[in-house]
Amino acid sequence: MGYRQFFLFILVLVSVLVNAQLYVLKGQRQDSSAFNCILHKELPALCDTFYKAIAQMNPEIIKPFVPDIKFLKGTFDTMDIEFRNDQVIFKHQMILRNLQRDCRKILKTTDRLKINLKKLTRTDLNYDYGKDEKENQYCYVTQYYQRKKHKYTLSFIAIMLNGHWFVGDELKFNALE
């Protein structure tokens, strides 16, 4: 009977010590594969949340509006002979980097023109839907904003993947005359 209690005590002690030795770095970077994108079934909801996010003046805020690698992989035909995982990763990185570059251009333009995106009010919203030869649905979205007498447009291409809308490309901010 004494041996059982002794081995049980050793087992509990070892499990406590092993659990206590888990070390987590301070300021550890999050795993990029655990990144989740925001899913929008309706395009107006995407437009509203995207404008609120871009008004925060941070290019990193665009990441949730781009389809992540797992979501992109689900849209490709994995039974295709020419399918490769590096193509999916490249496509994701290309979309993300282009949108971040365009966001930086917008922020430079708004700084140069001394425009605060948070103070703009949306006056109109225009959707121009289309389909490509592979029956992929996209929409060229133009949002019209006004501040006092000045008018501005924010435009981008939204793409539909597996029934969800994402920001795709050509993010532009223009001042209208």
Image (spheres, helix red, strand yellow):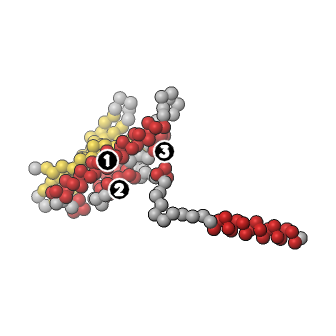
Q: Nearer the viewer, residue 166 or 115?
A: 115
Q: Is residue 165 above or below residue 145?
A: above
What SS does tag 2 mark?
A: helix
- Packing grade of label 3 (10 A; few <14, some 14-19, many >=20) is some
**Residue sitting at x 13%, y 61%:** 148
Q: Are marks 2 and 3 in contact (CB under 8 Å)?
A: no
Relative placement, left or right, of 45 versus 109 is: right
- Packing grade of label 2 (10 A; few <14, some 14-19, many >=20) is some
- Packing grade of label 1 (10 A; few <14, some 14-19, many >=20) is many
**Amino acid identity at mark 3:** Lys
Residue 115 appearing in the image:
yes
Question: Is the N terminus in the top left, top right, bottom left or bottom right quadrant?
Answer: bottom right
Residue at the disc numbered 2: 61
The location of residue 9, given as percent across then percent down, is: 78, 70
In the picture, the disc for residue 70 is 3
The location of residue 171, given as percent across then percent down, is: 27, 46
In the picture, the disc for residue 99 is 1
**Residue sitting at x 38%, y 30%:** 134
